[in-house]
Image (cartoon, rainbow, N blue to C red):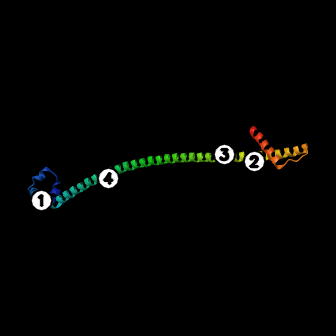
């Protein structure tokens, strides 16, 4: 009988089975074979598995370090982008304020130019009005002198010469000019 059949027949797993001479030899041979194959198992099975596990652990640690470095770089980039965005906002606000200032200055320049142009037009209109008034006064004076001469001729019944008319006109203008 083999050792398996002995174990099955005896019900197996008892302490007395260890001291059974048929089973004891089987245990010893199994132990000797295991001990003899242990270096081979260690070299060809456990060694590659251990190296594989160590390589895997190294890769995992490297990946974790790379992930941490990437996270730090991402955080640094985020801070940099946030700072640049804030700078851009400040620059845009500054440019907007500058544009508003230039627009206000331009508006004041245009208003000043419009006022100056309006004042020039007003002065030109006043000059034209003054000239028209002087022309009208001159014409009225001449008409008045002519009318006075005609009235004087009728009253005196004599005709004035051109020299008399010029003399009377000059006297009238002189007296009218001194009143104004």
Mark found first going from the N terminus, 3 or 4: 4
The local secondary structure at tag 2 comes to helix
Q: How far apart are marks 2 and 1 (CA)?
A: 137 Å
How many marks do you count on the picture? 4
Query: Residue 41: x and y, percent?
Result: 15, 60
Mark found first going from the N terminus, 3 or 1: 1
Q: Nearer the viewer, mark 2 or mark 1?
A: 2
Q: How far apart are marks 2 and 3 (CA)?
A: 18 Å
Q: Residue 120 carries which label?
A: none
The local secondary structure at tag 3 comes to helix
Mark found first going from the N terminus, 4 or 1: 1
Identify the residue at image location x=40%, y=49%: 84
Q: Distance between the residues labelled 4 and 1?
A: 43 Å
Quarter of the figure with the C terminus: top right
**Residue 152 in view:** yes
Mark found first going from the N terminus, 2 or 3: 3
The residue that disc 1 covers is: 39
Q: Which mark is residue 135?
A: 2
Query: Residue 75: x and y, percent?
Result: 35, 49
Confirm or deny contact between disc 3 and disc 1 (CB under 8 A).
no
The residue that disc 4 covers is: 70
Identify the residue at image location x=27%, y=52%: 65
Confirm or deny contact between disc 4 and disc 1 (CB under 8 A).
no
Q: Nearer the viewer, mark 3 or mark 4?
A: 3
Mark found first going from the N terminus, 2 or 4: 4
Task: Classify residue 159 as left or right of residue 94.
Answer: right
The residue that disc 3 covers is: 123
Q: How crowded is mark 3: few (under 14 residues within 10 Å), some or many (20 or more)?
A: few
Identify the residue at image location x=74%, y=38%: 178
């Amino acid at each position: 009988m083999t050792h398996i059949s002995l174990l099955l027949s005896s019900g197996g797993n008892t302490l007395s089975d260890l001291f059974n001479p048929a089973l004891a030899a089987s245990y010893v041979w199994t132990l000797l074979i295991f001990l003899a194959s242990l270096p081979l198992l260690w070299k060809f099975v456990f060694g590659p598995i251990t190296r594989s596990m160590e390589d895997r652990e190294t890769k995992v640690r490297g990946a974790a370090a790379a992930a941490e470095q990437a996270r730090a770089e991402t955080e640094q980039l985020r801070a940099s982008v946030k700072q640049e965005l804030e700078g851009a906002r400040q620059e845009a606000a500054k440019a907007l304020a500058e544009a508003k200032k230039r627009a206000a200055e331009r508006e004041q320049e245009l208003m000043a130019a419009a006022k100056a142009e309006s004042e020039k037009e007003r002065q030109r209109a006043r000059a034209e009005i003054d000239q028209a008034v002087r022309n009208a006064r001159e014409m009225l004076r001449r008409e008045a002198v002519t009318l006075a001469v005609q009235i004087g001729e009728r009253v005196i019944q004599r005709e004035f010469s051109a020299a008399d008319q010029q003399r009377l006109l000059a006297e009238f203008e002189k007296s009218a000019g001194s009143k104004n």
